[in-house]
Image (tube, rainbow, N blue to C red):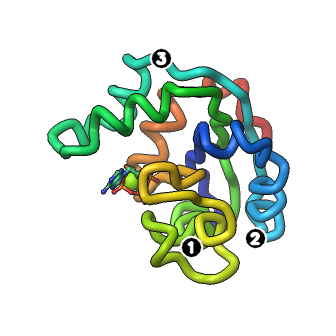
Amino acid sequence: MTEHTFSILKPDATRRNLTGAVNAVIEAAGLRIVAQKRIHMTTAQAGKFYEVHSERPFFGELVEFMTSGPVVVQVLEGENAVARYREVMGATNPANADEGTIRKLFAESVGENTVHGSDSQDNAALEIAQFFSGLEIVG
Ligand code: ATP
Ligand code: MG
């Protein structure tokens, strides 16, 4: 089934000029980038985005990292895009990520792990709506 998922290229990716390199892996995996923009998240935006983690010990560090530099927010389209992108990203901790995944190739640590991808279709819809209007998604 053709789906949309929400992706973020995190500040460690933009800092190292890896936007194109990460996008090449996404596209080679058969996912289509149907919306994309570079933004600098505010603390309020990052806090809202990661609200589910607000009680976790790393929450403050996570919000600080996500606001430490520009990010690229994206909508990806493809067959089973949510699950497919989670596969392409690899495990949260790059030490556990499979060969060829974005996090294995590029991530520096469990905190600075290069990409975000939605973990369900419901969350994908909510996350896309936080950053894009329907008019900005062009499939
Ligand atoms: P994401 O939601 O960013 O796609 P994920 O679903 O693989 O990643 P989550 O458990 O949702 O992982 O964690 C969200 C983010 O919080 C991680 O991507 C990482 O940046 C950060 N994080 C998770 N665990 C830790 C940790 N133990 N220490 C520091 N940061 C962490
Ligand atoms: Mg997550």
Q: Earlier in the sequence, mark 3 or mark 2?
A: 2
* Residue 5, image x, y percentages: 57, 51
For mark 2, what is the residue? 29
Q: Residue furthest left?
A: 55
Q: Which secondary structure lies at badge 1?
A: helix
Q: Are marks 2 and 1 in contact (CB under 8 Å)?
A: yes
Q: Earlier in the sequence, mark 3 or mark 1?
A: 3
For mark 3, what is the residue? 42
Count residues near mark 3 (Cα–Cα under 10 Å), then give few for <14, some for 14-19, many for 20+: some
Q: Earlier in the sequence, mark 2 or mark 1?
A: 2
Q: Amino acid at mark 2?
A: Ala
Alpha carbons under labels 3 and 2: distance apart: 31 Å
Q: Are marks 3 and 1 in contact (CB under 8 Å)?
A: no
Q: Quadrant of residue 101?
A: bottom right
Query: What residue do we see at 56% from left, 58% from top?
Result: 108
Q: Are marks 3 and 2 in contact (CB under 8 Å)?
A: no
Relative to 19, residue 42 above or below: above
For mark 1, what is the residue? 87
Disc 2 beta carbon < 8 A from ligand 1?
A: no
Front of the two marks 3 and 1: 3
Query: What residue do we see at 34% from left, 27% from top?
Result: 48
Along the horizontal axis of the image, is 128 left or right of 35? left
Q: Which secondary structure lies at badge 2?
A: loop
Q: Residue furthest bottom?
A: 99
Count residues near mark 2 (Cα–Cα under 10 Å), then give few for <14, some for 14-19, many for 20+: some
* Residue 105, image x, y percentages: 68, 69
Q: Amino acid at mark 1?
A: Glu
Q: Which mark is residue 34?
A: none
Q: Amino acid at mark 3?
A: Thr
